[in-house]
Image (cartoon, rainbow, N blue to C red):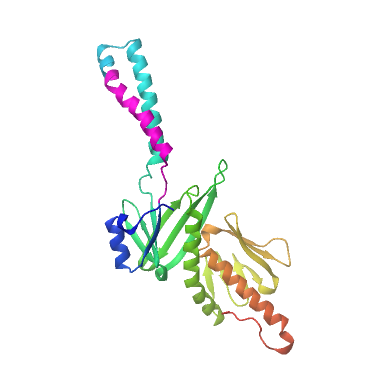
Amino acid sequence: MEEVTAADLPSRVRRAAEDERLGAFQAVHRPRSADRRSRAWLVLLGLPGLVLLPFTIAFLLDGLGWASGLSLSLTVAYLGAAARVLVRDVLPGQGATTVHLFENGVVLSSWRAVTPFPWDAVTELRVSGVRAAATGAVTWRLTLSGRAGAEAEALLDGGVPGARELVETVSREVTGRVLPEYLSRVGTGGKVRLGPFSVTRQGIAKDGEYVPWENVDRVEIESGMVHVDRADRPAGLTAIAAEVPNAVAFGELTRRLRAAHDGARTDGTTGRTVGSVNG
């Protein structure tokens, strides 16, 4: 993540963080990071194009000829290449969102809006990643929803150091706060709905298909998919991870419930439950 101090933060981001009491500033992650080579190429390509531009205009005003044609071709080539570097590698893009990480939450900011998210106020976190075939880097899509209808989305370039760590930090903080509520709800006989999945003390359901805990082999999140593998048949339950809010919390919830069921089943001869739903 980019090295930025609290003093470098835009005033509107700083005010939003102070109003929500997000605590100490920790790091910032911009949607795209322009390295020195990109800026150097921008200068090397843009400067000759700008120098040639007035000569090209003068030649064209004098009439078409080999000089005006050559000058026009070179100007278009230089300025076109510079524009490509500018848009692709330097400018973050209109509407692109920067993620500011604080001790007690995050602030997502773009040219249009600044949206603070204290950890305790986040209701849903959706994460998805797309791996680039050429580089292998993962571009992360992070969508946060909070109380009072607050919602914001950010694209995190996996090629920039710290992107994965930022996603893991946000996932860990949100999971640590929503998981106790999920465990309490299921422990008292309720149901937790996360996207297409419904979780109860008895098992998992999706699209009308129900799998009791004794038939759940494992639940894992891999390659942008959530898999619920069955022990009684090859086909299980699957969903796109981006469609499952708080997918990491879903995985931890199912792990604990399955462990609690296995513990109760193992010690069933004594009638005592070994596993605890809230453990």
Foreground residue, 171 or 237?
171
Q: Is residue 156 above or below residue 215?
A: above
Residue at 37% from the left image edge and 24% from the top image edge: 76
Q: Is residue 263 above or below residue 128?
A: below
Residue at 46% from the left image edge and 65% from the top image edge: 124
Residue 28 is a magenta residue:
no
The boundaries of the magenta stretch are 30-56
Which image quadrant for residue 234?
bottom right
Which image quadrant for residue 208?
bottom right
From where the camera sits, is residue 55 visible?
A: yes
Image spot of residue 169 (x, y percent)? 48, 62
Lateral position of residue 222 relative to residue 88, left or right = right
Foreground residue, 273 or 138?
138
Residue at 34% from the left image edge and 25% from the top image edge: 48
Question: In terms of secondary structure, what is the magenta stretch mainly?
Answer: helix
Lateral position of residue 22 relative to residue 263, left or right = left
Extreme-top residue of the structure: 65
From where the camera sits, is residue 195 visible?
A: no
Q: Is residue 76 above or below residue 267?
A: above
Image spot of residue 15 (x, y percent)? 28, 62
Quadrant for the C terminus in the image: bottom right
Image spot of residue 25 (x, y percent)? 37, 62
Image spot of residue 137 (x, y percent)? 54, 47
Q: Is residue 133 above or below residue 262?
A: above
